[in-house]
Amino acid sequence: LSKRKLKRLVLVISEIKTKEVMERWQFDIQTEEMNEEGENSTRQKDEKKIKQEMSDVIRQITASVTFLPLLEEPCSFDVLIYTGKETEAPSDWVESSACLIKNSEQNTFWSILN
């Protein structure tokens, strides 16, 4: 994050037996320029406000349980990391498909931008 290489993080929940993707949670990452002191050069945000915004997003995710189907089969999860093309991945990471869900519905949650 500090080097601004991370572009997207995706959490994929798959059924263990069939490997079918049951849920896919995508988090797009936008970072801001840092000055030489390691501080945000464009704006400062109060830590209390940041924590409140993060809490709001977590509350949205938790509330989504009301419209998501119950996962009845044993599942596992994978974390997909999207970076810029110039970023070299660690040697123990492997390439993956996008793990998309066929005929899926998408819900957009609030973002933390301001």
Image (cartoon, rainbow, N blue to C red):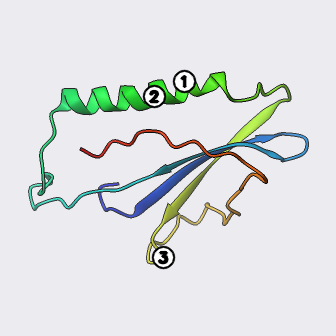
Mark nearer the N terminus (1 vs 3): 1
Q: Alpha carbon of mark 3 to alpha carbon of mark 2: how far? A: 30 Å
- State the quadrant of the N terminus: bottom left
- The residue beneath circle 2 is 58
The part of the image, by quadrant, that contains residue 3 is bottom left
Q: Is residue 109 above or below residue 51?
A: below
Say which amino acid is labelled 2.
Answer: Ile
- In the shown orientation, is residue 29 left or right of residue 43? right
Q: Is residue 92 above or below residue 26?
A: below
* The disc label shown at residue 70, or none: none
Q: Alpha carbon of mark 1 to alpha carbon of mark 3: how far? A: 33 Å
Q: Residue at x 26, y 33 (%)?
A: 50
Q: Residue at x 29, y 28 (%)?
A: 51
Tell me whether circle 2 and circle 1 mark residues in contact (CB < 8 Å).
yes
Say which amino acid is labelled 1.
Answer: Thr
Of badges 3 and 2, nearer the viewer stands: 2
Q: Is residue 89 above or below residue 108?
A: below
Q: Is residue 69 above or below residue 95?
A: above
Of badges 1 and 3, nearer the viewer stands: 1
Point out residue 8 in the picture as x, y percentages from the top left corner: 48, 56
Mark nearer the N terminus (3 vs 2): 2
- Of helix, strand and loop, which one carries label 2? helix
* The disc label shown at residue 85, or none: 3
- In the shown orientation, is residue 4 left or right of residue 16? left
- State the quadrant of the C terminus: top left
- The residue beneath circle 1 is 62
